């Protein structure tokens, strides 16, 4: 009888330890089998750290998210969040790099273009980046950067004209709605 009780107690202890470990992992939201999901969890932790002012921890969480899910459209979100934080911290060069990578992984998110041009502006690189883009224009999406740079440089009419031309030439692209909305809002604010 004592042996049976000891076996039951040992089994309960063994089972409860496994359950506690699994419960802790589940509470963290981490899965040892789904790195993409873990990337999402680390990204959210990064956002939480930003909210409470723990910027170094947030940077590390965003970098972990990128490392766990390095080559997907979701990666653009992680780079975008890291870039936003770098902008907030005044690290405009690293922010630029993040926004360029975000655009690489998701070239149809208009916010990334706005953020990229803002990083150029803070670095005093608007003219040099405009010159590069004009010489080495690769896709119609480069027109978005060119138009936004003109606007940032104070050449609003030239910038809006380029963005309007992009809207007319690329009506079916997903990003076109974002560009169109920006131009409409810009026109309302500057009338």
Image (cartoon, rainbow, N blue to C red):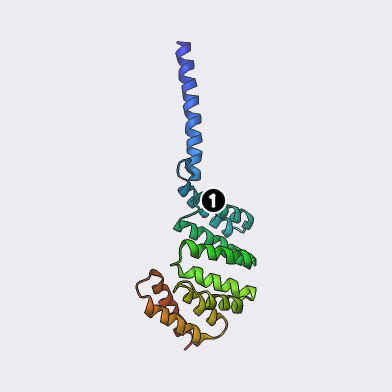
| Outermost front residue | 135
In the rendered image of this protein, does residue 49 appear above or below residue 100? above
Tell me if I can see residue 80 in this picture: no
Give how far across and how far down residue 15 sits, in percent.
Answer: 46, 27
Query: Compared with residue 5, is residue 166 higher up or lower down, i.e. above or below?
Result: below
Q: Is residue 41 visible?
A: yes
User: Among all residues in the image, which is located at the extreme left?
Assistant: 172
Identity of the residue drawn at 43% across and 75% down: 179
Q: Is residue 96 left or right of residue 180?
A: right
Residue 90 in percent (x, y) is at: 65, 67
Q: State the SS at label 1.
A: helix
Residue named by callout 1 = 67
Q: How many marks?
A: 1
Q: Closest to the observer: 144 or 95?
A: 144
Q: Is residue 88 above or below residue 185?
A: above
Residue farthest to the top, as pictured = 1
| Residue shown at 42% from the left, 78% from the top | 166
Viewer-nearest residue: 40 or 179: 179
Looking at the rendering, in which quadrant would you find the N terminus?
top left
- 158 lies above or below 77: below
Q: Residue at 48% x, 74% y: name it.
A: 142
Of residues 101 and 138, the one nearer the viewer is 138
Q: Horizontal and vertical percent for residue 124?
A: 64, 76
Label 1 Cα neighbours within 10 Å, binned few <14 / some 14-19 / many ≥20: some
Q: Position of residue 92 (x, y in %)?
A: 62, 68
């Amino acid at each position: 009888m004592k042996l049976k009780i000891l076996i039951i107690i040992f089994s309960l202890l063994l089972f409860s330890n496994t359950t506690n470990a699994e419960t802790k992992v589940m509470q963290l939201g981490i899965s040892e089998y789904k790195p993409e999901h873990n990337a999402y969890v680390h990204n959210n932790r990064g956002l939480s750290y930003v909210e409470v002012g723990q910027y170094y921890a947030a940077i590390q969480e965003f970098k972990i998210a990128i490392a766990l899910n390095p080559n997907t459209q979701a990666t653009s979100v992680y780079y975008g969040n890291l870039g936003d934080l770098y902008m907030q911290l005044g690290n405009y060069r690293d922010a630029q790099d993040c926004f360029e990578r975000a655009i690489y992984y998701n070239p149809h998110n208009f916010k990334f273009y706005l953020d990229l041009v803002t990083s150029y502006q803070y670095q005093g690189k608007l003219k040099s980046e405009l010159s590069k883009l004009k010489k080495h224009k690769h896709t119609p999406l480069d027109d978005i950067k060119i138009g936004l740079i003109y606007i940032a440089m104070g050449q609003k009419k030239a910038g809006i004209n380029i963005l309007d031309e992009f809207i007319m030439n690329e009506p079916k692209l997903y990003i076109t709605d974002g560009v169109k909305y920006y131009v409409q809002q810009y026109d309302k604010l500057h009338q």
